[in-house]
Every structure is written in structure tokens, then in C-alpha cells.
Image (tube, rainbow, N blue to C red):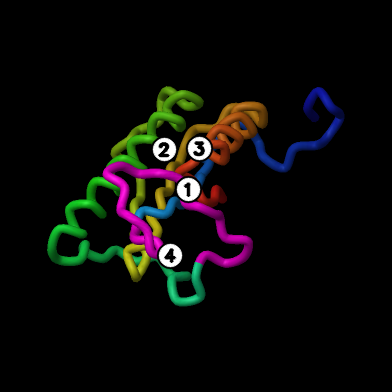
Amino acid sequence: MNSSGEVSLIEYPCDFPIKVMGRVGPSTAPSSTPSSLSAPASFPDGPLDPTDEFFIAMPAPEGASAVLLEQRRQEFTQAVLIIVKRHAPDFDETSVEVRISRKNTYLSLTCTIRAVSRAQLDALYQDLCDHPSVVMVL
């Protein structure tokens, strides 16, 4: 039991995977391409994109857009890792699983941390959800 009297279904400490998704590819709306990662104009209300639902490892497209895509991937990954390390200092960055969506629009990072409490997980989820580059946290 925790302090509020609720029974926890998770036994701490434990390994706990957290999937963080962010938009790193081109927007569907015409706009100028920013030089760094920025928040989308609006977040999706439902599924991300019916044709983009499966995340697979895929190389970046050819040309200058590939450079921008790689820069956005790195910026998003670094932002997520900073937040995760703030809440789980013992997190091993080399264990991150990275997948890009089929159309190179979304990046999915799975970080498995050693969770020690519900408060730790709640704070981590809140910080991730508050970040403007994050679209969804599971």
C-alpha cells in the first residue's frame, strides 16, 4: 500500500519500459522548415496517422532533408534522455530502443528504467508530457 491507501500493482524496484514518441519529420501543413526541433502547431487527437501506425527501423530519405531529419532525431533523443536521466540517474543510455515511423514522421524511443516508486514514475511521465517535442508517452 502507498500513502494514499491505494494498492500498487507494481512491485518496486522494477525494470519499467517507457515509450516516448515525438514528431521529427516534415509537417503535413505547408510551412517553412525550422532549423531546430519545435513543437507541432497542434497535437493529434486520435491515432497519429493511419498509414504511420507501425514503427520500423528505416534509413533517412536522400538529400538535404535527410540531414534535417537526422538533426531533429538527435535533438529529440537528447531532450528525452536528459529528462529520463533527471528522474533515473542510473539509466543506461545505450539501452534505448529507437524506431522511426515508416514515413520518417515520428520517432519512438523506448527507455527501460529501474523504477523505485510511483512518485518517480509520475514525475517522469509529467516532465516528458510537458516537453513541447513529445507527442505521446506510453
Q: Residue at x 30, y 42 (%)?
A: 36
Q: Secondary structure at mark 3?
A: loop
Q: Amino acid at mark 1?
A: Val
Q: Is residue 125 left or right of residue 32?
A: right
For residue 16, above or below residue 45:
above
Crowd class of label 1 (few under 14; some 14 to 19; many from 20; radius 10 Å): many
- Does the residue at mark 4 contact the one at mark 3 (Cβ under 8 Å)? no
Closer mark to the observer between disc 2 and disc 4: 4
Q: Is residue 88 left or right of residue 105?
A: right
User: Going from the N terminus, do you reach mark 2 or mark 1 first?
Assistant: 1
Q: CA distance from mark 1 to mark 3?
A: 11 Å
Q: Secondary structure at mark 4?
A: loop
Q: Secondary structure at mark 2?
A: helix
Farthest residue to the bottom: give it.
51
Q: CA distance from mark 3 to mark 2?
A: 9 Å
Residue 97 visible in this rendered orientation of the protein = yes
- Does the residue at mark 2 contact the one at mark 4 (Cβ under 8 Å)? no
Kindly report the secondary structure that dominates the magenta region of the rendered protein: loop
Q: Residue at x 58, y 27 (%)?
A: 116
Q: CA distance from mark 2 to mark 1?
A: 8 Å
Identify the residue position indicated by label 3 in the image.
131
How many labels sit on residues? 4
Identify the residue position indicated by label 2 in the image.
80
Identify the residue position indicated by label 4 in the image.
29
Task: Tell me which segment is drawn in magenta.
Answer: 25-48
Crowd class of label 4 (few under 14; some 14 to 19; many from 20; radius 10 Å): few
Crowd class of label 2 (few under 14; some 14 to 19; many from 20; radius 10 Å): many
